[in-house]
Structures are given as C-alpha cells and as structure tokens.
Image: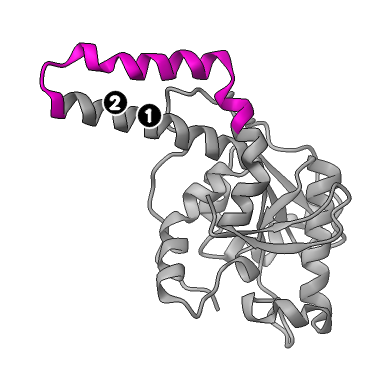
Amino acid sequence: MPIRLLAFDKTGSNIRLIGRNEIFTCILPGVFSKTADPKFQLEWTAAERLKDMHDTWSVNTLYRQNRMRELLQGAVEQSVDYAILSHTWIRDTPGDVVFQDWATREHMSRGNTKIVKFCEVAARNHDVTLGWIDTVCINKDSSSELDESIRSMYNWYRGASVCVAYLSETVDICGAHRDSWFTRGWTLQELLAPAHSVFYNRDWEQLGPSSDTEKATPKYNLPSKKQAGSPAESWS
C-alpha cells in the first residue's frame, strides 16, 4: 500500500491528501467484505488446520502465522482500489505540486490542474476515489520515505486498478511516439508493471482503447503483488 494517496469523491472533486491510517479507514468496509467471502473463509480455515500437519510446535506456529498474515495482507491490498499516474514532470517554474506545496497548490496553476484533471479522470472514467501521483504523494525531504517509495514503486504500479499515462505533449495518437514521456527512465517500469493502462493526450482525452491486459481475478492463496526492484533514478 502506498504511503499516502489522494482521496476524492465520485466526480473527482473535494481532493484530500491522506496517509496510511486514513487510507485504512477508507478501505475497512471492503476488507470486512473480502474476509466474509466464502473463498477467504475456506483459506482461513485451512490455515488454522496447519497445526495438524506439523509435529514441531514452533514450525506449526510459524506456518500458521505466516499463512494468516498472507491472507489478511492480501485482503487489505485487494481492497485498495486506486488509480496511479504516469507522467512527465513539468519543467517550467512553477512546476508540479510537490508534497511541501500541498497547502498552497492553487497558486501553482499547471501543477494543480494536473492533479485536478487526474482525479476527475480517475473518478469519472475508472470508477475509483483514490489516486497516487509521485510528485505530491512522496515527501522527498524524508530519506526513509524516499527509499521506501523507490523500492516499492513497481509494486505500487502493479497494484493499481488503472495506470493513467498522461502524454502532455501529444494531441493525437499519430504523434504520440514523439512525446518526451517515452524518454524517461521510469517509462519502461510504468509500462510493464500495471495490469491495466489507459493513455490520455494533453487535453486529458483518451488515446485509443485501453490496454488489453486486464487485472486478473485475485486469489486469496496467492500474493497479490509481484516482487521486483525499481531503477535507482531520482526525481528532478
């Protein structure tokens, strides 16, 4: 789960920046629903019965605890439906809104517009009310948070319900290949990691159909996120 997310209503309005405690509060009903699912209940019962499969108490306890932790973690992660943005940072000044600018973001017209449009697209086109943007959802002044974010980036993109790829220099699909989005160091990861991607042009209009790769139906007995490293590239 990302460290913080943007939260908004079903129209993409009333945007807030929330941390993990508030994120968990938002997804709690979904977690309860998933743990009440018959498939989850069967997996949980099987985990409880692991004690009958091992003679050594310590091994028995470790197996059971790890299995139950995996099931609960899966239920939580599968309840966090969020959109994630793949984009090119604004090179002009003022540029993108970063974490420290959140309270005064309305004074940064282009950066704030990107946030507003992303939330509107996420809510209206993709039916989610949570979103993640690297510019504002990471506190780069915290070395520990930056380190966790870089190491977790692949998983966060993989775990998103949809990746919104914003090509800010593109008008139509014929000219998309010239967009500077394709020159970024992060682009390959952000193409490979998401299970579902949709491209938008500079006016936030969809470019062609969404990606053919849809997110598979989650299974409680499998990890919900693929483990992989992230490129050691810092933001500028």
Helix, strand or loop at mark 2: helix
Q: Which mark is residue 64?
A: 2
Who's the residue at 63% across and 81% down the image? Answer: 100
* Up/down of 202 relative to 224, above or below: below
**Kind of residue indicated by mark 1:** Met
Confirm whether residue 162 shows in the render.
no
Is 65 colored magenta in this rendering? no
* Up/down of 76 relative to 118, above or below: above
Residue 52, horizontal then vertical, whole percent: 22, 11
The furthest residue to the left: 56
The furthest residue to the bottom: 93
Who's the residue at 51% across and 64% down the image? Answer: 185
Labelled pair 1, 2 in contact (Cβ < 8 Å): yes
Residue 134, horizontal then vertical, whole percent: 60, 65
Residue 76, horizontal then vertical, whole percent: 54, 38
Helix, strand or loop at mark 1: helix
**Kind of residue indicated by mark 2:** Arg
Please state the extent of the stretch shown in magenta in the rendering. 32-58
Q: Main secondary structure of the magenta part?
A: helix
Q: Which mark is residue 68?
A: 1
